[in-house]
Image (tube, rainbow, N blue to C red):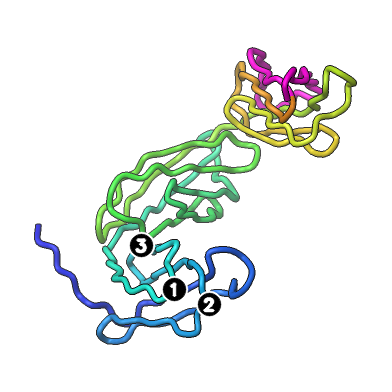
């Protein structure tokens, strides 16, 4: 099909410094009737430009240098609406929907709306407290609204501590992976991971200065928490 490029008036742009600090507060501008835009008084450095207009996916240009001239092409997208249930019995009160591209929406009372998104196939991730996260693929078409239904199931949780084999002290900032869900230990070596799938879950632990731990499993029970799971790390020979 033919592609027509038309200058867009009244789209909104924000311009912000690429890192926090000087000029971190975003500036905004609105395009004129010919689709032109300009930012003045910008400090030296690289910046991020976001272009927004109703009915179109947001376009992000990162690492834009000072005095740069560039064109932005907006392509119309579609939306996704959905219904999220718990154990196919009742609607989930609160949850979050995200995509790999960074789009996100907060769901309330079992309903959500996401978009506009670029046309194509997107994988949505749905997270809710105490429930196992789910992913769902959906096809987005230009100018259309796609509908999906997702059912989340109750999971289990694990909590405990990571300690050193040398002195039994807690290991801070250790990475604990249980069944693919990850947490960092606090200053005392404690951790907690929830929303785990029921069944045997593989455990992996790593921390700077220690040998990685793997090969252990823990049995996850629905609606229950395994407490006091102590994971012991051996100091590395050549940390």
Q: Secondary structure at mark 2?
A: loop
Q: Quadrant of residue 56?
A: bottom left
Answer whether residue 110 is magenta in the image.
Answer: no
In the rendered view, would you say 223 is above or below 85?
above
Mark number, residue 43: 2
Which label was assigned to residue 16? none
Percent position of residue 48, x then y: 47, 66
Per the image, label 1 sits on a secondary structure element best described as loop
Q: In the picture, which quadrant includes the N terminus?
A: bottom left
Label 2 vs label 3: CA separation?
28 Å
> Extreme top residue here?
215
Q: CA gap, disc 2 to disc 1?
A: 8 Å
Residue at image position (67%, 21%) is 212
Question: CB of mark 2 within 8 Å of CB of mark 1?
Answer: yes
Q: Is residue 18 left or right of residue 194?
A: left
Q: What is the number of the mark on residue 66?
A: 1
């Amino acid at each position: 099909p033919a592609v027509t490029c038309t200058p867009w008036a009244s789209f909104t742009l924000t311009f912000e410094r690429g890192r926090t600090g000087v000029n971190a507060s975003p500036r905004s501008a609105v395009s004129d009737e010919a689709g032109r835009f300009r930012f003045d008084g910008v400090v030296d450095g690289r910046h991020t430009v976001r272009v927004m207009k109703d009915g179109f996916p947001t376009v992000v240009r990162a690492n834009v240098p000072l005095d740069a001239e560039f064109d932005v092409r907006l392509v119309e997208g579609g939306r996704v609406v959905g219904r999220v249930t718990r154990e196919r019995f009742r609607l989930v009160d609160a949850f979050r929907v995200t995509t790999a591209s960074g789009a996100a929406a907060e769901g309330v009372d079992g309903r959500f709306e996401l978009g506009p998104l670029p046309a194509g196939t997107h994988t949505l991730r749905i997270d809710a407290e105490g429930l196992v996260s789910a992913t769902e693929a959906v096809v987005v078409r230009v100018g259309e609204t796609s509908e999906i239904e997702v059912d989340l199931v109750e999971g289990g949780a694990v909590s405990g501590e990571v300690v050193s084999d040398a002195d039994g002290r807690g290991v801070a900032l250790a990475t604990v992976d249980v069944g693919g869900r990850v947490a960092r230990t606090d200053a005392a070596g404690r951790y907690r991971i929830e929303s785990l799938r029921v069944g045997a879950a593989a455990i992996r632990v790593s921390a700077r200065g220690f040998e990685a731990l793997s090969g252990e499993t823990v049995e996850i029970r629905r609606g229950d928490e395994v407490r006091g799971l102590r994971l012991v790390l051996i100091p590395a020979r050549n940390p």
